[in-house]
Amino acid sequence: ALALAGGRPPMAIRIFFPSSTSFSTAQPSSTATRTSRQRSMMTVSITGATGFVGRRLVHKLLSEDHKVCVLTRSTSKASSVFPASRYPGVTVADKEGDWERCIRDSTGVVNLAGMPISTRWSPEIKREILQSRVNVTSKVVDHINSSDSSNGNGPSVFVSATAVGYYGTSETDSFDESSPSGNDYLAHVCREWEGRARQVKQEHVRLVLIRIGVVLGKDGGALAKMIPLFMMFAGGPLGTGRQWFSWIHLDDLVDLIYESLRNPAYTGVINGTAPNPVRLSELCERLGQVVGRPSWLPVPGLAIKALLGEGATVVLDGQKVLPARATQLGFSYRYPYVRDALKAIAKQL
């Protein structure tokens, strides 16, 4: 399980039934009232809360005395990740009406849902990768827009995940938030994903789109697959190792989402990456150093393509993405350099 980084221990789950009372009896009458309430106690509805990033975000919010509604399709899965005996600050909603009520009674919504992309892409899988993002985002936006935010009801901020795949791939170019979209499949997915999020009524709801890079942490993402190979002396770069690796430590991403919920200056597109991207070969070398293993066994690109087909682009192609907007906003990274991020993760092994 992900470790709780300080604060009070979480308490118990309340399942959201249609007859449940709302999170707060306060009925804010203006954006200013909602903003004031947001800065003190938030109630945040989250899709993808049982995933790698979502779990840590829930812990962060609870440790700061906020409330969470987990928007899910599976109560059993959510209850196993957030057992009732430990999480009384969490409500689980798995029905359409429950999603609507949770979102209406929230101060903010975070959308993290989406099928993993590191797999072989059949035509059916490609449709699911797109639809798992577009459909959930559309559903959330519809509920936000129907919550009458103009009268002070409903959330005042919507933080929706997207990905650095928006920019396409390149070994030579750098990308920031002002860069145009690429023209490959993942860029298309990101454009559609963001397009649905932009349908939220932005005159009443602040929209933040976080284009997330490769998230580094012990219990999920790329490192969860790489570390066991390195520990067996079988680690090394994938393909040429020259591809750019735009990464962010899990704790920094969660902090960025949290700040986006609380700070009105955070709006529009923000790249969720560390300020110092590296080539994949450097990442592997640094990882070998911190776990005391060599990075000596590269995996040929042809072998990866044989295994993953078109999906091999996820690991063989990269992009150098810089967080210009987060830097401009003064966001403070705990781990701006990959060596420090990997050292911190290695200490948890």
Image (cartoon, grey):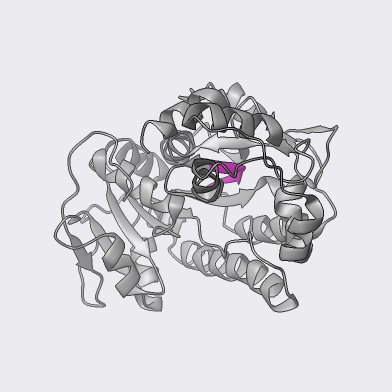
Vertical relation: 93 (above or below) 301? below
Q: How many marks?
A: 0
Q: Residue at 44% across / 57% down in the picture?
A: 51
Query: Over which residues does the magenta segment extend?
Result: 206-215
The answer to whether any part of residue 125 appears in the image is: yes
Residue 241 placement (x, y as % from top left): 75, 38
Residue 24: quadrant of the picture: bottom left
Vertical relation: 211 (above or below) 88? above
Name the dominant secondary structure of the magenta segment.
Answer: strand
Looking at the image, residue 107 sits to the left or right of residue 299; the answer is left
Q: Residue at 60% across / 37% down in the picture?
A: 247
Q: Quadrant of the C terminus?
A: top left
Residue 27: quadrant of the picture: bottom left
Vertical relation: 145 (above or below) 205? below
Residue 313 placement (x, y as % from top left): 76, 54
The single residue placed furthest to the front in the displayed view is 233
Residue 77 placement (x, y as % from top left): 34, 70
Looking at the image, residue 134 sits to the left or right of residue 6; the answer is right
Closest to the observer: 153 or 195?
195
The answer to whether any part of residue 109 appears in the image is: no
Residue 50: quadrant of the picture: bottom left
Residue 309 placement (x, y as % from top left): 77, 65
Q: Residue at 78% across / 35% down in the picture?
A: 242
Q: Is residue 214 magenta?
A: yes
Q: Is residue 118 magenta?
A: no
Q: Residue at 28% across / 66% down in the picture?
A: 80
